[in-house]
Every structure is written in structure tokens, then in C-alpha cells.
Image (tube, coloured by chain):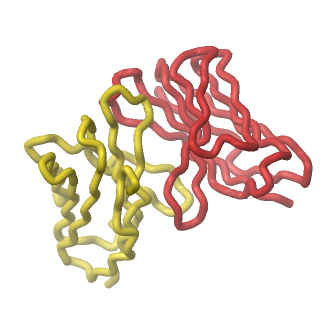
Chain colours: A yellow, B red
């Protein structure tokens, strides 16, 4: 089983839709969690950190479920500009190596 | 402004040639990383370094070499032993605290002539 797993998609949604991605992790010692956004042939950019209590930034909401070992990203009112790949990143205590999921592709169409 | 800089943006390699990708950061980060990304794929770790003069192999180190003579710099050499080097290469850095986020350079696209 991979350490961090994501459904690669693509998720194809119309503008204005709400879409949610999940990311599961296998190591229960994982301590911090992030969602990054990556556009084609560009570097990943931090979208948001994921906190235990859940957190929201505008149209984006991230949540952590430690019991089931997954994090989620919810995007409301999708825009064309949200089309990108969304990478889940997990840091595990005692390791200096962040672990990446493969990424989930989102395509928002008119 | 603090940041992490990769160069060149595009690089072409001839058969049997070694090429070096540059990565410089002025964020005072201890940890630096090199990743390879193939089309439609995730990031795979090549090498990482936690402190100056020390580095460790990642998942796909064969055919690559690195050095960490200065805190700010972590160059990656793609050697002739790497038979399939065409990919997008990303350098990243992070403070030593394990809960911190990664900062990425803008990437180098390497292609074989």
C-alpha cells in the first residue's frame, strides 16, 4: 500500500460546482498535512495547510480525519481557474522527507 | 525577497553527457530536496540533504549525483548513467522543523537531444 494515496481523476466539473477530493495516508505517526496546487509544467504552490479542527480559506475547506487517516479538500463555486492538479503532502514525525500523493486532476469547464 | 531559484529553465542533454542543474535558496533552510516529475505522474524523490556536507539517496538516485558544500546551494548532476533523463526537475527547501511546508523552485525541464 502506498503511503499517500489520491484518486488521479480527472474530475471534470462545470463552473459553479462543488467538488471534493480525498487523500489517505498509511502512517498513523503523520503530523502535518498540506494541499498544494500544481499547474502544468509549473512548481507546486501551497494552497493550504490542514489543521486538526479543519480550516477554510474562501471557497476552499480542508479537513483532517485522524481516525480514518485521510484529509479532504472541498472546493465550492468552482472557477475555470481552479483547473489544476491538487497534491496532498504528508509530513511524518521523525522523518525529514515529506511524502507526496500522486495528485488529483481537476478540470472545470464552462 | 527570500526564495529558491532554479536554473536553467530548459536544458538539453546530448547522449553521454553530464549536465548540472542549479538550485539556490536564501531562506536559511537546512533541508533541501530534488524531485523528478514525469508527465502525468507525481513527484519522486531523487536526493535530499538535511545539513551542509551531508546528503541521502531518495527513491530514484541511480544516475544522479549531488553536493551540498554550502547551505544555500544543492546542485544536481544528471550523469550519462541516467538513461531516461527527460523529465521536469524540481528543487525544494524547508526549515528543519518537520511540520513546516516546502518551498519550491520554478523547475527545470530537461530533454535529450
Which sits in the foreground, B13 or B47? B47
Which sits in the foreground, B34 or B83? B83
Q: Is residue B32 left or right of residue A68?
A: right
> Residue B5: x and y, percent?
59, 35
> Residue B42: x and y, percent?
49, 57
Quadrant of residue B105 within the rendered picture:
top right
* Residue at the image point whose x is 25% and y is 79% from the top: A15
* Residue at the image point whose x is 63% and y is 24% from the top: B73
User: In the rendered image, is residue B90 in sight?
Assistant: no
> Residue B61: x and y, percent?
66, 41
Residue furthest front as drawn: A1
Q: Quadrant of the N terminus of chain A?
A: bottom left
Q: Quadrant of the C terminus of chain A?
A: bottom left
Which sits in the foreground, A32 or A39? A32
Quadrant of residue A84 within the rendered picture:
bottom left
* Residue at the image point whose x is 27% and y is 56% from the top: A24
> Residue A88: x and y, percent?
34, 52
Total marks shown come to 0
From what the image shows, is residue B26 above or below residue A33? above
Q: Is residue A44 left or right of residue A48?
A: right
From what the image shows, is residue A44 above or below residue A74? above
User: In the rendered image, is residue B2 in sight?
Assistant: yes
Residue furthest left as drawn: A53
From what the image shows, is residue B25 above or below residue B35? above
From what the image shows, is residue A29 above or below residue A106? above
Q: Is residue B36 left or right of residue A68?
A: right
Amino acid at each position: 500500500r502506498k503511503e499517500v494515496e489520491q484518486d488521479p481523476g480527472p474530475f471534470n466539473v462545470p463552473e459553479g460546482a462543488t467538488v471534493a477530493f480525498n487523500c489517505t495516508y498509511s502512517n498513523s505517526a503523520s503530523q502535518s498535512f498540506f494541499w498544494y496546487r500544481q499547474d502544468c509544467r509549473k512548481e507546486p504552490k501551497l494552497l493550504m495547510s490542514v489543521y486538526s479542527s479543519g480550516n477554510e480559506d474562501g471557497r476552499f475547506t480542508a479537513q483532517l480525519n485522524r481516525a480514518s487517516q485521510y484529509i479532504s479538500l472541498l472546493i465550492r463555486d468552482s472557477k475555470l481557474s481552479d483547473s489544476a492538479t491538487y497534491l496532498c503532502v504528508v509530513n511524518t514525525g521523525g522523518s525529514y522527507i515529506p511524502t507526496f500523493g500522486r495528485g488529483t486532476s481537476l478540470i472545470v469547464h464552462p | 525577497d527570500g526564495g529558491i531559484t532554479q536554473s536553467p529553465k530548459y536544458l538539453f542533454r546530448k547522449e553521454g553527457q553530464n549536465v548540472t542543474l542549479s538550485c539556490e535558496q536564501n531562506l536559511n533552510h537546512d533541508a533541501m530536496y530534488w524531485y523528478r516529475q514525469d508527465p502525468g505522474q507525481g513527484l519522486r524523490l531523487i536526493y535530499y540533504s538535511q545539513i551542509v556536507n551531508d546528503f541521502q539517496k531518495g527513491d530514484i538516485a541511480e544516475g544522479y549525483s549531488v553536493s551540498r558544500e554550502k547551505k544555500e546551494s544543492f546542485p544536481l548532476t544528471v550523469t550519462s548513467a541516467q538513461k531516461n533523463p527527460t523529465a521536469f526537475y524540481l528543487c525544494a527547501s524547508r526549515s528543519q522543523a518537520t511540520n513546516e511546508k516546502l518551498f519550491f523552485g520554478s523547475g527545470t525541464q530537461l530533454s535529450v537531444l
